[in-house]
Amino acid sequence: MIGSKFPRLRTTRTVGVRARLLLIVLIPSLALLATGIGGATYLVQSGRKANRFAELASGTTAPAIMMVEAFQEERRISLLHLAGDNTAAPNLPASRKQSDLALAAVAAQGAAVSELRPDLASDIDGYNELYKQLPGLRAGIDARALPAPQVFAVFSQIIQVITLASLLAAEVAPDAEVAVELYKAVHALRAAEAVSRTSSLGSVSLLSEELTPETLAELSGYIGDGRGEITYVGAVLTGARLEQWKKLTGGADWQRVIAMEDALLQRGPVTAADNRKSTVPELPMDVVEWQRAAGTVRTDLLQLWEDQSADAHVAATASGDRISRNSILGGAGIFSLALLAFLAAALLANRFIGRMKRLRRDTLVLADERLPETIRQLSSGHAVADGEVAQLDYGTDEIGQVADAFNRAHSAAVAAAVAESQTRAGVNAVFLNIAHRSQVVVHRQLGLLDQAEREEETPERLDLLFELDHLATRARRNAENLIILGGEQPGRRWRNPVPLIDVIRGAVAESQDYTRIHIGRLPENQITGAAVADVIHLLAELADNATAYSPPESRVEITGNLVGRGTALEISDQGLGMTAEDLAQRNAVLADPPDFSVAALSGDARLGLFVVAKLAVRHGISVRLTDSDYGGIKAIVLIPAELTAPDVLAAPRGFQGLGSLTPVESFDRPAGITATPEAPAAAAERPGLPRRQRTTDTYPGNS
């Protein structure tokens, strides 16, 4: 009905994949081109701004230093004049002339300052009003009609203008690196001003022979500021500037200034009466010497400020040039990339269509002919209905045809997976049956060997029987390995808890090179009966691994102690160890063992690792490999507290305690195998481990 109303909808052609690919590439290519052109333009402008900043900033640095030096000197001489130093007055005209020249030089850079920071116009006007007060201030100084604190404050405010301007210049730096370098320079300027203030104000106190507590507190603040700024400068400067700072702080003038400041602070407040009584301690320098040393330090700090600022300006210029150059190259590269992307898309679109057609043909051949034939050869004939396989639906274009081909391949793959699972189940059943039969044979062999050991009295033949007993015990463990990997449990079980020492001895007895294994200090506790067999098996595999991968003349150490979560055992060898990558892989398997299959072992012949992992997960035991103190490998086994019990009646550390390792049930028989007198279904008749009770030799673990 809908088709009858809208017949034209059926004739509408679907846009081909080639057109879609070209459209997909064209849109982002144009967007990339526009973004690249815009970004390149912006970066070029940023580079030019950086160059302009460096030009303006470098032009204002020299007048700023000239102004700071001039007004610091005028402040010093003015304060000396007000303090009664008659030698200061002749120097006032020259210092004032120098200050006026410096002020004129800074004013000439007003346009540059406004360009650097347009919002400074109002602040500059305020400082101009401060400069207009200079004639009246100087007249009051000449007449000695102004108090020294007022004169000190006015000159300090004028000098503070330069400090503020330096900070504002750092704020408008073209990038963070330049700004940081300029901020470093400002700290040198602050240090110079602090040294100047301290020497000027302190000299006034010395000339007036009076140091009030208020003035002393102010001096203390300036001294602290100066030393803090100098310390900070030394911490942030690098290269040539750091060497310059080291030379300054290691010089004699700086040391003399420090000594003078320390002596002034230690002397404390001084009154005129104290001076008349001659009770005031002498200072290391007089006023003239202090002024000379402080002037040298101040000049060096201002030079450091100038040099550090120049370094920042050079960095700004280099940054601007680099940004401009890279921007032009980047813009050209983006344009070329966008053009190449579109041309490549047109070429690849045609190839892609041809590849999809070939993929459709090859996939249909695989799904309809080759893969089903292979599956029919490997399976028992069971097939999966078409309705059980999910279908992909991507329309009727080329991609839809590829999806349909994959649908058929998917159906065939599902059928192959079903057949493979059935095959693996059958192989596993045969695998377990063979393992059980091997276990029965080994158990019978152990019974006969045990009987022969009891009846034999010749030492040489008894040694041979012990060796055969040991080999048979290891063969039993190998059979149990197969049972564990097949998903079942071995038959050996214990009803009562067994002392930990006996469990470890049992594991050692099952090891191939047991004479090299040394048992150290162990806690006196027990392992619950349900976990004894698996713990013995787990420890035996780790001990075997330690002896197999270490030199034959070296020892393997087994030690243990109680920890918060249970009992921790360490098995350390002296082998070559593993790489960090191999250790990580082994520990990953131990923490989360994969499904056992032929594929899981195809690249690694260490079967015991899977057995240890399976047993550890079964009982919640943690096993981790790490580097040992001897350069080899140390296996750390954490047995949880749930699997342990206190050893109330701890047996001596002699070897005769192995009698407690008597299993309640020897093994689980596969179907079709019956119990015989040599292999009973449930025996409390013989210990689960060989008992080597020799009269002349001692067991290596007894030491």
Image (tube, helix red, strand yellow):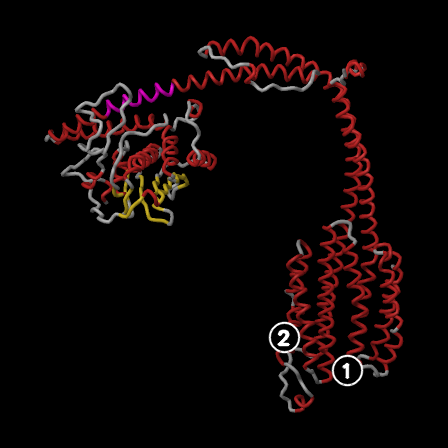
Quadrant into which the C terminus falls: top left
Whether residue 568 sits left or right of residue 463 in the image: it is right
Which residue is disc 2 drawn over?
262
At mark 2, the secondary structure is helix
At mark 1, the secondary structure is loop
Quadrant into which the N terminus falls: top right
At 25% across and 47% down in the image, what residue appears? 647
Whether residue 81 sits left or right of residue 450 in the image: it is right
Task: Give the mark nearer the N terminus: 1 vs 2.
Answer: 1
Percent position of residue 239, x then y: 66, 53
The kind of residue tagged 2 is: Asp
Whether residue 87 sits left or right of residue 662 in the image: it is right
Question: Could one spot residue 521 in this view of the protein?
Answer: no
Dominant secondary structure, magenta: helix
Question: Could one spot residue 363 in this view of the protein?
Answer: yes
Task: Kindly identify which numbered label has been placed on residue 83.
Answer: 1
At 31% across and 42% down in the image, what residue appears? 558
Q: CA distance from mark 1 to mark 2?
A: 22 Å
Q: Nearer the viewer, residue 356 or 292?
A: 356
Percent position of residue 669, x then y: 27, 24
At 19% across and 35% down in the image, what residue appears? 691
Circle 2 packing at 10 Å, graded few (<14), some (14-19), many (20+), is some
Whether 465 is drawn above or below 244: the answer is above
Circle 1 packing at 10 Å, graded few (<14), some (14-19), many (20+), is many
Percent position of residue 488, x then y: 34, 28
Whether 617 is drawn above or below 157: the answer is above
Q: Nearer the viewer, residue 512 or 632?
A: 512
**Bounds of the magenta span?**
427-442
The kind of residue tagged 1 is: Ala
